[in-house]
Amino acid sequence: MNLVSLQNRIVNGKWMLERRALYSFYDTVQNLSSIKVGGLQSLIFGNPLVAKMQDHPFQTSNGVSSAGDMSIIQVSGILTKSPGSMEAEMLGLCDTDEISMALDEAVNDASVRSIVMAFNSPGGDTVGIAELGRKIKDIDTNIKPIYAWTETGMNSAAYWLGSQARLIGMTDSAAILSCGVYMIVLDASNKYKEEGVNPQVIAAESSPHKMIGHDMKPLTLEEKDYLQQDVNRQHQSFIDVVKESRPDIKDEALTGRSYEGREAFAMGAVDIVVDDFDSFLEEITDQQ
């Protein structure tokens, strides 16, 4: 997926992404599309990084140093499916296909007993999230336990994924949830008119919905209703998936807000609130 594809998806796709993150993402994509990029090699946010943590030491409650035989999958950045490598590096995108492959590696490694998905993500595109969520649930239920953790953020689409793990842990200052879905449709028809541009679109009479969401024209009431129902269905799917895994979560927690540690715990959105990752590892090790 290149920059043009990303631009199209931003204004026509469904997103489960924190509002502030989308604003920043949109501005960055727009800026990058207007300049010639050459030799940019630095990572802006980083990509998913898989680290097998068989030798990761942590202190148990009795003060004895121990080691966990687990795979840690870092989920960092805006979630999207199959971005181009350049776009992923420049925009800090997290490829859901890479997460899926990392899960496969952990499943097939006989020395790995459990998996931790460590999130630092505001969410992302809806494409591929439901399928990856089902994969996480299947692995946790039938193969190896999966735990979700964040000390920064696990929001929107990222929370969809994290909610499919056996347990969710976080620090008190981290933020999670933001269960919501939206779509942005730009209407640039007045801008075109002011610039003396009069686009003429010839669409097949047998495909009257082909131009829904194009910026050359405003949405009709029928088109807006169609898109509204589409977004509503996606949000209801989000709610259903979370409540199936977390039946005690409060309904008011699933209306789009993010929550920090103790409040998230009170809402039933998280299981463990601790000060750091090692403390989280102690907690889940005790429960294995």
Image (cartoon, rainbow, N blue to C red):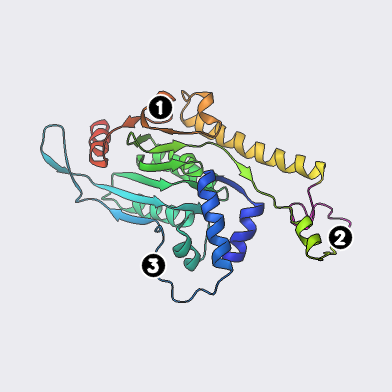
The image quarter in which residue 42 lies: bottom left
Task: Determine the residue positioned at 84% across, 53% down.
Answer: 208
Q: Is residue 164 visible?
A: no
Task: Determine the residue positioned at 29% across, 51% down.
Answer: 110
Task: Count residues near mark 3 (Cα–Cα under 10 Å), then give few for <14, some for 14-19, many for 20+.
Answer: few
Out of 104 and 187, give the one closest to the viewer: 187
Residue lying at the far right of the rendered structure: 205
Q: Which residues are magenta?
A: 202-219
On residue 227, the disc is none
Q: Earlier along the polypeptide chain: callout 3 or callout 1?
A: 3
Residue type, mark 1 in image = Glu
The percent position of residue 161, horizontal first and vertical second, equals 46, 42
Residue ID for mark 3: 42
The percent position of residue 76, horizontal first and vertical second, equals 40, 52
The percent position of residue 143, horizontal first and vertical second, equals 37, 42
Q: CA distance from mark 3 to mark 1?
A: 37 Å
The percent position of residue 89, horizontal first and vertical second, equals 44, 64
Residue type, mark 3 in image = Ser
On residue 204, the disc is 2
**Element marked by disc 3:** loop
Q: Is residue 35 visible?
A: yes
Q: Quadrant of the C terminus?
A: top left
Residue type, mark 2 in image = Ala
Residue ID for mark 1: 263
Quick check: is 215 in the magenta stretch?
Answer: yes
Judge whether 132 appears above or below 263 on screen.
below
Main SS of the magenta part reads loop
